[in-house]
Amino acid sequence: MIGAIKLFFIGIILGVANVIPGVSGGTIAVVFNVYDRLIGVITIKIKKILSEWKFILPLGLGMVAGIIGFSKILTFLFEHYPMQTNLFFVGIIAGSIPLIYRKIKSSMKEVSEKNKKVQFFTTILCCVIFLGIMIIMTVFKDVSTSTVIYTELSLPLFFLLLVSGALGAIAMIIPGISGSFLLLAIGTYATVIGSVSDFNIPLMIPTAIGILLGLLVGAYLVRTLMEKVPCQTYGAILGLIIGSIFTVFPLGLLITRCTELSGDTFTASLGALLVGLLCCVVGFFTSYLSSKNS
């Protein structure tokens, strides 16, 4: 029972993360150590899905609850307390790094002494490459994006929503990459969110088909990589996780608050900075302690 409740609350956080541009649902799944199991149940094998219903049901219900009930709350926090909210996510992401390191060490134990140096080098290389990709994405993340909301389905829009849904779902599976941010960059985020809030069935259908296809393809790809090259895969995930800190870190907001540490604004700005630091610490230990024994 306790395990189901824990999965439900993890599902809530996953649901919220997947609707906020810039926050990676895959990262959150890694943080709470449900990533490997989640990848394993995204399959067309009905027996496999049914055998994991005790895992899927509470997690799935939590995700639905998170998307419907908590996304507005988190949106409010991002609008009114962006620095503190982002620092909380920075702490959560940073707290998952020891878990990934332990997974790399565990995978290395299964490698023969003859191949250990090669495995170590390629794992580091994968980590550096994907860390570099995340840093590049951070540098260019402020590209102009379309905010046009389409309300009527056309053939070109059908294929656009289908493709963007598939790409967004694949991105959701990969730690460090935000599926919502990818939709925002493609220019379909506002339309997808609008169709869900307005319950626009014709627009929701191609998006749902795309998401289903993307989840199946993405999960199969990740499963294959974990089976064939686990060290390198976890190395790449480590790079993505570390890189996502750069994506979420509110550097501009911190600089603004620091420059306000003078005159009448000193107390308010210092208080905001201290609260932000506390949020980061709370996020770190929430993540670290939840995966400490995993």
Image (cartoon, rainbow, N blue to C red):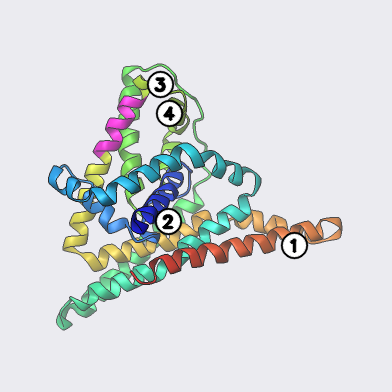
Looking at the image, tell me whether mark 3 or mark 1 is earlier in sequence order.
3
Q: Is residue 218 above or below residue 88?
A: above
Tag 3 secondary structure: loop
Q: Is 125 part of what is drawn in magenta?
A: no
Depth check: 31 or 235 in front? Answer: 31
Q: Is residue 86 above or below residue 120?
A: above
Q: Amino acid at mark 1?
A: Leu
Residue 176 visible, this angle: no
In the image, taking residue 67 as reference, residue 204 lies left or right, namely left
Q: CA distance from mark 4 to mark 2?
A: 29 Å
Q: Amino acid at mark 3?
A: Asn
Q: Give the x, y percent position of residue 39.
A: 25, 52
**Residue corresponding to mark 3:** 200
Depth check: 123 or 234 in front? Answer: 234
**In the drawing, what numbered circle is on residue 134?**
2
Looking at the image, tell me whether mark 1 or mark 4 is earlier in sequence order.
4
Q: Quadrant of residue 208?
A: top left
**Residue corresponding to mark 4:** 196
Looking at the image, tell me whether mark 4 or mark 2 is earlier in sequence order.
2
User: CB of mark 3 within 8 Å of CB of mark 1?
Assistant: no
Q: CA distance from mark 1 to mark 2?
A: 31 Å
**Residue corresponding to mark 1:** 270
User: CB of mark 1 within 8 Å of CB of mark 4?
Assistant: no
Q: CA distance from mark 3 to mark 2?
A: 34 Å
Depth check: 151 or 125 in front? Answer: 151
Tag 1 secondary structure: helix
Nearer the viewer's eye, disc 4 or disc 2? 4
The quarter of the rendered structure image containing the C terminus is bottom left
Q: Give the magenta range.
A: 204-213
Q: Amino acid at mark 4?
A: Val
